[in-house]
Image (cartoon, grey):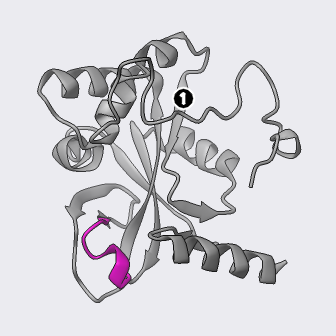
Amino acid sequence: HLGAGREYDLARKIGGLKVFPPFGETGVQVYTGKLQALSNVVGYIEKTGCDTVILADSGIVSSIDYKDVLKKHAQSGADITALYKKETIDSASKTDNVVFEVGEDGVISKVYINDDTQEVVCNSMWAYVISKELLLKLVKEGVKQGLTNFERDVLQQIVGEIKVVGYEYTGVLKRITSLKAYFDANLDLINRE
């Protein structure tokens, strides 16, 4: 839905939005996890002129203002800011979700993988703000250890060691878990306009 990106100030050669395919170079296989996918584009990440990176998966549709997220990330002094929405976990996400335990101070103290509770939880939006330096360190160390999953193998393990802060998103959010969910989300967003 970004089109050429001109409306969002993304139609430029330096900076802006970069979409990485599940492989970074010829001969690289489709990745098995986010860490492996990021390791395939480490060279590109190293060459970017930015100090802060936003990681966002493609299975979430929202109208989030990342300028506000970046501002709050900087103000909090967080090493990582993890975006979430308070909601119940739908049946399509029972085996593919990440839930955060967020304190009153906004700091994330625990990360749960595939939580099957029926209660309202801080459900991950699969989006993170992190410094380029820390991201590269985590990716390189993780790949050396044979790790593949960013949330399970890295984030869940380092919560408490570094400052991970939550950012609650309260706007419209659609999770794309199937082709039908994709079409339903598009129709819902069109009907809202």
The structure residue drawn at horizontal position 73% and vertical position 75%, both measured from the top left corner, is: 189
In the rendered image, residue 105, in percent from the top left (x then y), is placed at 39, 60
Examine the rendered structure and indicate whether residue 99 appears above or below residue 32: below
Residue 90, can we see it?
yes
For the C terminus, the image quarter is bottom right
The image quarter in which residue 119 lies: bottom left
Examine the rendered structure and indicate whether residue 74 appears above or below residue 125: above
The structure residue drawn at horizontal position 20% and vertical position 39%, both measured from the top left corner, is: 161
* Left/right of residue 71 with respect to residue 93 in the rendered view: right
Considering depth in this image, is 138 or 105 the residue closer to the camera? 138
* Left/right of residue 8 with respect to residue 171 in the rendered view: right
Would you name the residue on which mark 1 appears?
52
Residue 172, can we see it?
no
Count of marks, rendered view: 1
For the N terminus, the image quarter is bottom right
The structure residue drawn at horizontal position 30% and vertical position 26%, both measured from the top left corner, is: 139
What is the span of residues highlighted in magenta in the rendered image? 89-99
Furthest residue toward left: 145
